[in-house]
Amino acid sequence: MRSRVIHLINPKTDSLTTRPIYMKRALYSPLAGLLAVAACIPQDRYEVVLTDENIEDIDFDLDCDMVGISAMTSYVNRGYQIADRFRARGIPVIMGGVHPSFMPKEALSHADAVCIGEAELVMPRILDDLEKGDLRGTYRSDKLCPMEGMPMPRYDLVKGHRYVNKTFVQTSRGCHQACTFCAEPLMNGLKFRYRPIPEVIHEMETCGQRTVSINDADFFGTRERPKELMKALRGRGIKWQAGVTSKLAGDDEMLELAAESGCTMMSIGFESISRDTLKSVHKSVNRPDDYVRLVEKIHSHGIMVFGLFMFGFDTDDADVFDETAQFNIDAGFDMTAYSVLTPYPGTLTWYEMKRAGRLVSHDWTKYDQAHIVYTPERMEAETLRDGHRRAFRTFYSGSSMAKRFPWSGPRDRTMWTIYNLFMKKGAAGDKRFKQVAPETAKTQHAPMPPILPTKKDWRNAILSDAETAGAFETAEKARR
C-alpha cells in the first residue's frame, strides 16, 4: 500500500526576487509558509512533495491525495489555474495564504477548501476531514497560534541550490504598525507573539545553513526582545539579516548587539522621503530627516541597508522619482527596491480607493507592486509607470553602483555585489514596468480580513463593504 501523498505548491510569482536570474538561482525562496505547513503534517502518515513553480515545473500527473496551494494576490490566478487542473482529476485542493484568507469565497470557486489565516491549529482537522473524504469549506482557528513548541520547518524539502537566500526563520508574528497599505496586522494581529528564544536558536543551529534570514514583519518591533535573542546568538557563527523599522534601527545598543551576533543586512521600509506622505499612511515612525544619519550609523557597524520605497501615494507628484533615487544614491544606500503603491483587497487603502471610485483593474495578476491598478491623485498613470522604471535604472546605473560600493570598511562586498547585480538585471528585464493595467470588471467578492482592525472607522468600512456585496453572514460573524 502506497503512502498517502500531499502535494504543496507555490505558484509562479515572477517577481524580481523570486525569478531565477543568475546561474538558475533566485535571490529569495518564497517557501517559508509552505515549509511551516509541511511541518504540521505527520511524516509517519504522509509523504509531502513540495514544488516552487518559480524554479521548476509542476507535475500535474503526480499521484497524490491532496494538493495544497499558497498564494498572494499577484499570483493567486495562477493558483486557481493549478487548482482547477488537479480538481479535474478528482484530487481535492485546499488553498491558503494571504489572498485566499482575505477572499475565501472567491477561492472556494476554485478549491474544495480554504485555510483562513494560520494553519497550525487547524491542520489536524484538515487531515481528519481528508481521511474521511470530507474536505470542504473554510478552516480557521478561533484563536491565534501560540508560538511555543512549533514544529521545525521542513527545510529538507527545499532545493537549496536554486536560491541565494533559502532559510527563513520566524521568531515572531504580528506588527505594531497599522500602515494603511499593509495586510500584516489584518493577517497576524497588531500584537507581537514571540517564539521562545531557545527554540529559535535550536532552529538556527539545526536548519543546515549558517546564513539565515529572520522572517518577521519587524524584528526590531520592541526594544528588549531582539536584544535577548541577539545576545543568545553571539559567538555561534551565524550570519543573519532581518526586516526592521527605522524606529529602533538607530539604537546604539541594538546595533552593537546586531553586529556582534552576525547581522549582515537590515531591510527597512522607509517608504517615502516625504514626512507628509508618511503621516497620510500612518507610517509616522519614519523620520526622513534622520534617514542619512541612520544609514551612516548602520554602516559604521558593518551592516548593509536595503531600503524599501514606494511610489504612487496621493501626496506624490512627478518629481518624487528622481528626488528619491538621487537621495538614495547620495545617502549611500546599499540596495533599494522601489514598488508602486498597490491597494491589496482588504487593506484600508483598498477601501479608500474603492469608495473614491479610483480602482481601475481587478485583475489580480496586476497586483504585483509594479503595475498601476488605480488612478493616481497627482499624476498620470503613465508618469507613475515611467518614473518607477527610471528610479530603478538611476539607482542601479553603473555610476551609482561605483559611487555606492563599500570600497572600505567591514560591509560584505561579495554580498553587496550579488544583491546589486540581481536587482540591476532583474529590474532591467522586468516587462511589468512598461504596463499600466487596463480597466476590468469589478470583483464580485468582498474582502474579509481574518482579523478586523481595532479602529472603528476602518472596521466599519470593511463590514459595510461586505454587506454591500451580499456577504451578510460573514459580516455578522465578524461583528460578533
Image: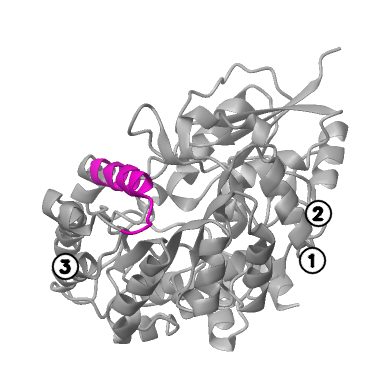
Q: Main secondary structure of the magenta part?
A: helix
Secondary element at image label 3: helix
Whichever of labels 2 and 1 marks the residue nearer the N terminus, that label is: 2
Instruction: Work out whether residue 359 or residue 214 is closer to the camera in this orientation and state it.
Output: 214
Gap between marks 1 and 3 measured at Cα = 46 Å
Side of 391 where 312 appears, left or right: right
* Residue drawn at (63%, 18%) of the image: 62
Residue matched to label 2:
121
Q: Which residues are magenta?
A: 409-425
Residue 217 in the image, given as x and y percentages of width and height? 55, 64
In the displayed structure, does residue 330 sit left or right of residue 468? Answer: left
Count residues near mark 1 (Cα–Cα under 10 Å), then give few for <14, some for 14-19, many for 20+.
few
Q: Residue drawn at (20%, 57%), measured in percent from left and top?
A: 395
Residue depth check, mark 2 versus mark 3: number of the one nearer the observer: 3
CA–CA distance between discs 2 and 1? Answer: 9 Å
Look at the numbered disc 1 and give the secondary structure of its residue: loop
Q: Quadrant of the C terminus?
A: bottom right
Evaluate whether residue 109 shows in this view: no
Residue displayed at 17% across by 76% down: 317
The picture quadrant where one finds residue 92 is top right
x and y percentages locating residue 312 in the rendered image: 27, 69
Which of 480/285 is in front? 285
Residue 15 placement (x, y as % from top left): 37, 44
Residue, disc 3: 326
Q: Which residue appears at 62% of the width and 30% of the height?
A: 50
Residue 143: which disc?
1
